[in-house]
Amino acid sequence: MDSISLTVNGVPREAQDVRPHTTLLNWLRDQGLTGCKEGCAEGECGACAVLLARPTEDGGTRLDSVNACLVLLPALEGQEVVTAEGLGAPGALHPVQRELAYRGGSQCGYCTPGFVVSMAAEYYREDRPAEEFDIHALSGNLCRCTGYRPIQDAALALGGPAEEDAFAARREQAAPIPQATRLHTPDGEFYRPTTLAEALDLLAANPAARLLAGGTDWGVEVNIRHARAGVTIAVDGLPELRTLTWNPDSVEIGAGLNLSEIERRLAGQVPLLEEWFPLFASRLIRNSATLGGNLGTASPIGDSPPVLLALDARVVLASTGGEREVPLAGYFTGYRQTLRRQGELIRAVRIPLPLAPVSGFYKIAKRRFDDISSVAVGIALDLGGGVVRSVRIGLGGVAATPLRALATEEALTGQPWNERTVREAARILRGEGTPLDDHRASAAYRAAMLEQTLLKFYFEKTAQEVTV
């Protein structure tokens, strides 16, 4: 196989001589679809946004916005893509395009197609009331000259799709499912297996292979650092990695579900995750990023480990030899190093039940949204009679690995939950980890934020509810 078949703006296309590291963005521009722009090549500006047709749980289609700069073209065999050009034309503008034009939402126009696509994704969200628009759907799109007020005005002026709207009707039809792919080129090989067993066999035969889920980390490496892999194995479409199951003693989340899917399917039943989701990058990124990928990269500043550590999560690792389950608290062994062995992949994350009644997530970054954290803290607390029965505190950004604040947890456990106890524990938390100075924050700032975070948690979440 040396070509990829996909549908773009309703037209079947054949991509010839595809390389394993060709991005959807670059291929679209080669086809003359230059509304898709490269602004940052790392999924932060949204100028390259496109819509992907993906299956819903009830057999329909969801139009998800994603960053084309991070999507590898070979991962789209048999898939369906819509660009800004496919939404409307000069003589027949899409409602989103019309509102942006009418309300002065574009100046240089470089970012406009990306805004159009992200607005269209929200416009066609299946559970969106016609009179509402979630402006955070645009959090991954940057504009440097128009100003956001007219863009926001355009978004808030949108009603619901008309009855004759073809894209609204498309939602009622089945979406394409991931297709088996075997691509062999002089630049490397790309595989999309259709079963977990097949994926594990491939991984056993190619232990140095790059596992590809959402691509929000690997895509940056490909674009910015020109990284290349001899063998790439796409695992995001594997049914065994796309389950979400409630058991009597745990909830198991498949490693191949993207974060937006997890958010929808949990529907607020894990409050700490519900608090965390909006602070993880942008909607464009959450429509691709997975828990498996975030844990697999083992970054010390990944946002999911502090939350999952606070939830006492466990990682399910699978190989041709079977499965094993390891506590996330012992999973990280060094900078970007883990217990995962050659031939293993992350199949799922298990969160034990019942959940701690009081929890919170705090992310300290230069921007409120869509930014890398300087410090991230997840806290889960169980109280009984005004005394701390148990507490778990997960930290990110303060050491070579994500970690549990064990000394602080010990200082709190069994103690009365009052301001004096918390202030003493907060001073201990200040010294957890090995904070460093870098371009995001100084070591002193990180230490101060750790201390203040526990105090903030106390006053915001529990001080008014607990009688000491």
Image: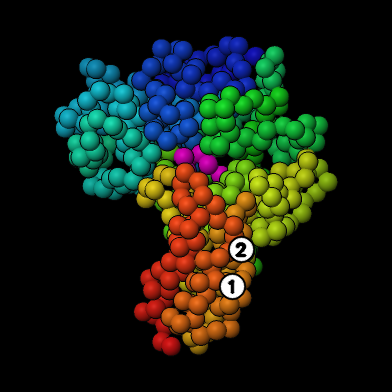
* Tally of numbered discs: 2
- The residue at the point 69 percent across, 46 percent down is 337
Residue 139 picture location, percent across and down: 35, 42
Residue 209 appears anywhere in the view: yes
Q: Quick one: quadrant of the C terminus?
A: bottom left
Q: Earlier in the sequence, mark 2 or mark 1?
A: 2
* Residue type (three-letter) at the residue carrying disc 2: Arg
Identify the residue at image location x=47%, y=67%: 451
Q: What coloring was used for the rendering?
A: rainbow
Q: Nearer the viewer, residue 139 or 54?
A: 139
Query: SS at mark 1?
Result: helix
Q: Nearer the viewer, residue 435 or 297?
A: 435
Residue drawn at the location 33% of the way across and 35% of the way down = 142
The residue closer to the viewer here, 314 or 179, is 314
404 lies above or below 185:
below
Q: Which residue in the protein does label 1 denote? A: 409
Q: Report, in whole angstroms, how far the alpha carbon at label 2 lies from the one at label 1.
A: 8 Å
For disc 2, the marked residue is 404
- Label pair 2/1, CB-CB below 8 angstroms: yes
**Badge 2: how crowded within 10 Å, few (<14), some, or many (20+)?**
many
Query: Residue 99, percent across and down?
Result: 20, 32
Q: Nearer the viewer, residue 232 or 223?
A: 223
